[in-house]
Amino acid sequence: MPYPDDPSSTPAGLIRLRNLAGDSAVINLYGGQILSWRTANGGERLYCSQMLPTKPGGPTRGGVPICFPQFADRGPLPKHGLVRTTVWHTDSVSTIHAEEVARAHLWLAASDATRALWPHEFELQLDIALGTNTLEVGLTVSNQGTSAFSFTGALHTYLASEDVRQLSVSGLQDVHYIDSAQGQTQATQFDKLLHIAEETDRIYLSPPPSLQLQSTVTQRALLQVDQEGFCDSVVWNPGPSKAEQLGDMVPSDWIRMLCIEAAQVAQPVHLAPQAQWRGVQRLRVLSD
């Protein structure tokens, strides 16, 4: 689903990427958020709600939001941290890069506004690479201060779906998880495939580095999701009941999306002064 076609929702400016094969991506400098990823055949691979945020200045629901330095409401900071509603910086705005791999580089540093809520000196670097049928997102966190800090976070990727009830996720068999939809209970997934038919909110602990999204109709693998650096994977879908409560997406859109997130949740990263951490998520279309 395309991102909201409303200039008022993207006042910070957009970066538009296109490679030689015809793949394209749109990145909002507000939040450093990828809003759209289309492969050369025109297929939109990311879900993005057509509804504007419920609060002025709020984040857009969809694309690839960046959660830092806190995942969800698991801490004292605003939900998913501070950087989804902050303007990022880049060297190029509204530029099309006609290369085999089109790239964008964004960055964000601590400010008075972030220090008021989280008193640490940090810098984030976001590297986006758009290849043929692939999208790679790399997040680098640097401690620019003189004292250590700890953080959690995620690349909160919303994948597009015609009907999530006809999809399954493979690669999670025998992986332990925290079930946030069931009061933070812990369990192990014994089924080979994860099917989505209702609210699903699971933090998979130490999953394998590669997962696949599959069609239960054709039995084909549709998309591969790889990650590095991040120790957890989150699978989230609001289901029909919770979708009615969200306010910033059409309730029936719950079947149009599935979040498979590269995440660092259960064990925060402890970053020493002048140290760096990097996490990467790679998405590769396998078939339609």
Image (cartoon, rainbow, N blue to C red):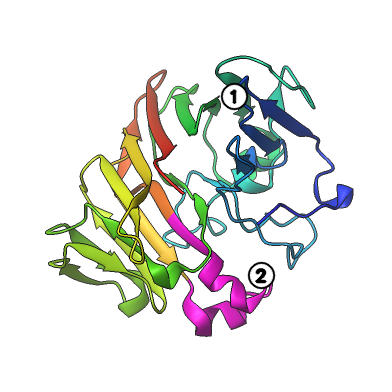
**Disc nearest the viewer among 2 and 1:** 1
Q: Is residue 195 left or right of residue 23?
A: left
Quadrant position of residue 196: bottom left
Q: Quick check: 271 above or below 273?
A: below
Looking at the rendering, the stretch of residues picked out in magenta corresponds to: 238-259
What amino acid is found at the position of numbered circle 1 in the picture? Ala
Mark 1 Cα-neighbour bin, 10 Å: few <14, some 14–19, many ≥20: some
| Vertical relation: 242 (above or below) 184 | below
Q: Residue at x 85, y 42 (%)?
A: 11
Mark 2 burial class by Cα count in 10 Å: few <14, some 14-19, many 20+: many
Query: For residue 21, which numbered disc appears in the image?
Result: 1
- Nearer the N terminus, badge 2 or badge 1? 1
Image side of residue 219 versus residue 72, left or right: left
Q: Locate residue 234, reporting x and y percent.
A: 36, 56
Rendered location of residue 10, percent (x, y): 80, 45
Q: As rendered, which of 140 and 42 lies closer to the eye?
A: 42
Up-down: is 209 above or below 17?
Answer: below
Confirm or deny contact between disc 2 and disc 1 (CB under 8 A): no
Q: Amino acid at mark 2?
A: Met
For the residues labelled 2 and 1, the Cα–Cα distance comes to 32 Å
Q: Position of residue 142 (x, y in %)?
A: 46, 24
Q: Which SS class for mark 2?
A: loop
Residue 22 location (% of width, % of height) = 64, 28
- Say above or below: 256 vs 260: below
Work out whether residue 45 or residue 142 is closer to the camera in this orientation and state it.
45
* Residue 258 colored in magenta in the image: yes
Left or right: residue 179 versus residue 87 is left
- What residue does disc 2 label? 249
Q: Quadrant for residue 50, please give it.
A: bottom right
Q: Quadrant of the N terminus?
A: bottom right
